[in-house]
């Protein structure tokens, strides 16, 4: 599939907010996804947003969608050390997910 | 509630050996997928099965075969392993795609495969 773009690294201090950005390519995706991968583990579905929504909030997570610019962001409020992981955004291409390369989030005390 | 189960978790092979990676899901999902994850490359789709009895190639199918054994199980086979196939392999499943609406995929914990 065509590229889903993400920045590769983000470092924040514990307690600050983290914002991970993504640009996607497939405007026909019904949903857009954020997955989290902890070291040595599989991908965990973190949240997803329906393509006709602008924003979705789920506890500390806020997803913003700008369909015009094909821009998706994930905001984590009050970031904790346990949030350190790789975060992938994904759209759909045909029948399967099309992933970005992932953003490594490092949370420092 | 196991979700998606992959076996084995780790495997080391010699070049030219064959092996089958197993995947089973207990969520009654129609669709199943195999991805590989390489450093700096994200996840790439190898094969998928939209429903029982069907399989289709993804982005990187060369060197692999798949079998959708039944609704629960979807296996990935390397007939003659090559060092370039050293990777982490993930299986995933989802509800069927209906009316163009895509469904979330649920992933197993992965198989870490090294080819020497």
Image (tube, coloured by chain):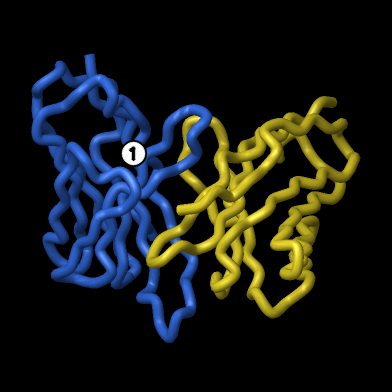
Colour applied to chain A: yellow
**In this picture, is B25 found above or below B85?**
below
Check disc 1 and report its element: helix, strand or loop.
strand
In percent of width and height, residue B77 lies at 15, 41
In percent of width and height, residue B109 lies at 40, 42
Q: Which residue is mark 1?
A: B89
**In this picture, is B36 found above or below A50?**
above
At x 56%, y 39%, the residue is A101
At x 42%, y 36%, the residue is B37
Answer yes or no: is residue A25 visible.
yes
The image quadrant of residue A94 is bottom left
**In this picture, is A85 found above or below B44?**
above
In percent of width and height, residue B62 lies at 21, 40
Q: Which chain is the one coloured blue?
A: B
Q: Nearer the viewer, residue B87 or B1?
A: B87
At x 55%, y 73%, the residue is A28
Location of the C terminus of chain A by quadrant is top right
Callout 1 environment at 10 Å: few (<14), some (14 to 19), or many (20+)? many
**Residue at the bottom extreme of this rendering:** B99
Q: Nearer the viewer, residue B84 or A76?
A: B84
Answer yes or no: is residue B5 visible.
no
Q: Nearer the viewer, residue B111 or B40?
A: B40
The image quadrant of residue A108 is top right
In percent of width and height, residue B41 lies at 48, 34
Q: Is residue B94 left or right of residue A83?
A: left
Q: Is residue A91 left or right of residue A96?
A: right
């Amino acid at each position: 599939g065509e590229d889903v773009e993400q920045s590769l690294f983000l470092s924040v201090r514990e307690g600050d907010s983290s914002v991970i950005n993504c640009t996607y390519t497939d405007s026909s995706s019904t949903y857009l996804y954020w997955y989290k991968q902890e070291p040595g583990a599989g991908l965990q579905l973190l949240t997803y947003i329906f393509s006709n929504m602008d924003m979705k909030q789920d506890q500390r997570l806020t997803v913003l969608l700008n369909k015009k610019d094909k821009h998706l962001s994930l905001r984590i409020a009050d970031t904790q050390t346990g949030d350190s992981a790789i975060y992938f955004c994904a759209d759909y291409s045909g029948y399967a997910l099309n992933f970005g390369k992932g953003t490594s989030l490092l949370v420092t005390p | 509630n196991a979700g998606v189960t992959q076996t084995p978790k780790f495997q080391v092979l010699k070049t030219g050996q064959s092996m089958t990676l197993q995947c089973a899901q207990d969520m009654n999902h129609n669709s199943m997928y195999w991805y590989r994850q390489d450093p700096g490359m994200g996840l790439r789709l190898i094969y998928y099965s939209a429903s029982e009895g069907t399989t289709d190639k993804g982005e990187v199918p060369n060197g692999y075969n798949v079998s959708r054994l039944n609704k629960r199980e979807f296996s990935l086979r390397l007939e003659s392993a090559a060092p370039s196939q050293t990777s982490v392999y993930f299986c995933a499943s989802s509800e069927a795609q209906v009316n163009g609406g895509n469904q979330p995929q649920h992933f197993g914990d992965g198989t870490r495969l090294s080819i020497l």
